[in-house]
Image (cartoon, coloured by chain):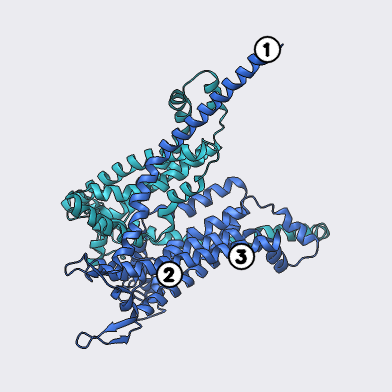
Chain colours: A blue, B cyan
Amino acid sequence: MPGASRISRDANTTLLMAKKERSRQTRRARFLLLLPVLLVIGIFGLFPLSIALVYSFLEPGTYGGVEWVFSTDAYVQFLFERDIFDDTLTFNSAYLQIFGRSFGLAFITMIGTLILGFPVAYFIAARPPEQRNFWLFAITLPFWTNLLIRTYSMLLIVRDEGIVNLLLINMGIINEPLEMLYTDGAVLAGLVYSYLPFMILPIYASLEKFDFSLLEAGHDLYASRVQVFRHIIIPITRPGIVAGCVLVLIPALGAFITPELLGGGKKLMIGNLIALQFGAGRNWPFGSAAALILMALVLISLLISLRVGAAKEGSHG
Amino acid sequence: MAKLSSLFSRSTGSRELRKQPLFTGMSWLVLFMLYAPITVLIVFSFNDNRSVVRWTEFSLRWYSAALENDDIRDAALISIQVAFTATFFATIIATMAALATTRSGQYWGKSASIALINQPLMIPEIVTAIATLSFFSILRHITGVTGIGWLILAHTVFCVPFAYMPIRARLTDMSVTYEAAAADLYASPLQTFRYVTLPLLMPGVVAGAMLAFVVSLDDVIITLLVAGPGETTLPIYILGQIRRGVTPEVNAVSTILIGVTVIMVTLTFFLQRKRK
């Protein structure tokens, strides 16, 4: 008997050692599998952001690039204008206005996509499953289509000689073409058009598994339409709405192509301001500083969205 | 009959709740809004006239003009070269990462790794673009290396999360029982991967590769800032032309690009649907 127990103990030890060896192998395999992605995105995706931080504290080079001299001018320039002759600073709100405009446009875009997108997401989720695939495909396809080309197609429509003006003139509603291009309205229409799928898809995802008989239950308990909407549908879709708002707000804040083509370079947004500094503006430090301020805005929006998302669990959990 | 329907009126009312007729109308309107501008662009690429709004006659003249244009051909070749190479590397990297984040249990740093992989999606593209440009300008200066490799590297980085998504989804849906059975039959981990996991995973890999390809092919902002002289991709060429004015030739090139995207995304959609 003692011999048998010794054998089983040996077997146990062997098993344990084999298990340990296997978990060591798993760890090594896992590490090797992760290594390329960590290197590529870590070094060439994440690390460059710290370069931008460093650049924002340097002086601009004459032909682009930077001079390796410490300076906070990039941030000062954001709020003040330095007089060339006596070096005095005067308050200048031009850049603040661009940030304000961008935030305003991005916010209205978010609300616009929500108003247009929510009914669509709800409608798709209430379809029978075989019809859902068609709708999802139809909504997703524009998302993958080139943003530049979609913006260009929008430009073709709102131009002075565009199809909208042509139709209105032919129908005798107007005599002169409406000037729609190069206005805030055109930029807004372009932004909503570009980012609508980002709003629809997450709201749909939050409704996908929703049991619509719950609505009937609410209805049976004499809840009004508004009450059903407020107490059943909104709480269920809340995570989707928050996710959709973030997914629209972030790219809309940093939009470059839409204001470039539909705003005609006069209606600058943050994205154009940044790109300009790395192009004709030749002020890389200022461009880097603007990019970092944009990042800060994005992070603040993300934090707010986390709070709003968490508030829901607090009141319903 | 009227009585009968009034008997059921309550249930009809709740079904109304599910249907929301106003929402139905709005959904079709949104669908129209999403497709009308692109449709106009495509239709007028086949117009036998310089105008992009007045229809005269069907013609392929803008397509033949586009194909004979050397600038467009060069740009297309560069686009394809960059997209293929970036897709190749991004798909391999993403497949490895997907295996590591689905097939090796829970471990420290797993959610951080996933966050890192998705990082390019959470940062506005313009910020990524200028940060990459700044970093590459230093690296170019130090190493003295120039050429299209830098552009391909930048594309690889933002293609990884797009390739990763469908591959990871496929792995999560795949039962581990096949791999466990292979291991029970004394297949080595490498054999299990080669003969069991990879064939089952293939639809996910192909879907991921096609999404990466589309994303690389369509990129404007990062390419605009990072590309060196002579590295004009098709979208950058189109942007330059649009800035100069509207021509049907641009419509033709755009339609070709849209066509490639639609074909690839449709294939991806069906590849991902099959698994159900």
Label 2 neighbour load within 10 Å: few <14, some 14-19, many 20+: some
Q: Amino acid at mark 3?
A: Leu
Q: Which quadrant, please, contains the N terminus of chain B?
A: bottom right
Instruction: Name the one closer to the observer, B181 or A192.
Output: B181
Residue mark closest to the camera, 3 vs 1? 1
In the depicted structure, whether residue B58 falls above or below residue A23: below
Residue shown at 23% from the left, 57% from the top: B137
- The residue pinned by badge 3 equals B22
* Residue B270 at least partly seen: no
Tell me whether the residue at label 3 lies in contact with that at label 2, contact meaning CB atoms closer than 8 angstroms: no
Instruction: Name the one closer to the observer, A163 or A218.
Output: A218
Q: Amino acid at mark 1?
A: Ala
Q: Amino acid at mark 2?
A: Ala
Any mark on residue A189, and which?
A: 2
Q: Earlier in the sequence, mark 2 or mark 1?
A: 1
Residue mark closest to the camera, 3 vs 2? 2
In the depicted structure, whether residue A2 falls above or below residue B118: above
- The residue pinned by badge 1 equals A4
Tell whether B191 sits left or right of A124: left
The quarter of the picture where residue B46 lies is: bottom left
Q: What is the spatial separation of the Cα atoms under label 3 and label 1, in whole angstroms?
A: 78 Å
